[in-house]
Amino acid sequence: MKRIDFWFDPISPFAYLAFERLPQALEGCTYAVEYRPVLFAAMLQHWGHKGPAEIEPKRAWTFRHVAWLAHTHGIALQAPAEHPFNPLALLRLVVAAGANRRTVEAVMRHVWIGGASATDATRMAALAHTLAPARNPSSDAVKAELRASTDQAIARGIFGVPTFGLDGRLFWGVDALPMLRAALAGDAWFDGPAWDEAASSRPGVRRV
């Protein structure tokens, strides 16, 4: 059985959409998913890039786009009351409770359904009660595990969420799901030189 690594941060609406779309996008395929929580902000800092919500015209387009994608695919989505927000408590809760389909679903829907504040203390307490983590989300061990997961992702060249890993290849974004499915299904394109050749062109101009 093939394993798919799914790197995510619940701050990303695209990660939420990808999470919800994954079972339908890969219907009929045999696979197992390893859910890997990471801190998207640390990736942005490492690669020297701003998040889409930090550039006002891009923020407006991003939320229009994700609203359209949710509408198209029949996925419930209401943006949280504040965005961006600090997702650390949510990420640590996932780590403490164990990153599986159930816990990730609970956290994703906590953020992206209902339009409430993702970090409201009362809502966070209710979510923690529901997930009943075996470990303390505020413990040094949980914090270190999240940092290690993020560092490992960056070391692999991951720059954004959602990112999927399959057979040593990385697929970024919800719009990469058809490509991921093709790779999982054994599309011959992935057996030839096309994958490496497509990334071989070099930039002719660099900003300083």
Image: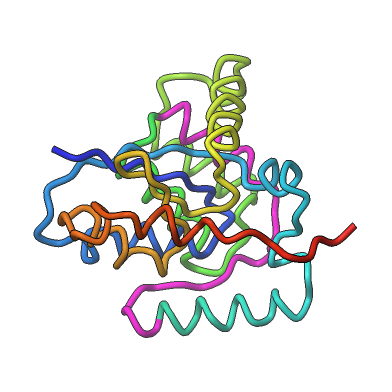
Q: Position of residue 205 (x, y in %)?
A: 78, 65
Q: Is residue 165 left or right of residue 125?
A: left
Q: Nearer the viewer, residue 198 or 176?
A: 198
Relative to 181, residue 156 above or below: above
Relative to 36, residue 23 above or below: below
Q: Position of residue 54 (x, y in %)?
A: 77, 65
Query: Which residue is at 62% across, 47% downward?
Result: 40
Query: Which residue is at 60% across, 37% downward?
Result: 154
Q: Nearer the viewer, residue 83 or 186?
A: 186
**Region rendered in magenta:** 71-97
Q: Is residue 95 magenta?
A: yes
Please identify the quadrant where the C terminus is shown. Answer: bottom right
Relative to 62, residue 191 above or below: above
The quadrant in which residue 155 appears is top right
The quadrant in which residue 152 appears is top right
Q: Position of residue 19 (x, y in %)?
A: 37, 57
Please identify the quadrant where the N terminus is shown. Answer: top left
Q: Is residue 77 left or right of residue 33?
A: right
Residue sitting at the far left: 28
Query: How many marks do you count on the picture?
Result: 0
Q: Nearer the viewer, residue 11 or 205?
A: 205
Q: Is residue 3 magenta?
A: no
Colouring: rainbow
Q: Is residue 117 left or right of residue 196?
A: right
Residue sitting at the far right: 208
Q: Nearer the viewer, residue 9 or 208?
A: 208
Query: Which residue is at 52% across, 64% downward?
Result: 13
Q: Position of residue 69 (x, y in %)?
A: 43, 79
Relative to 52, residue 180 above or below: above
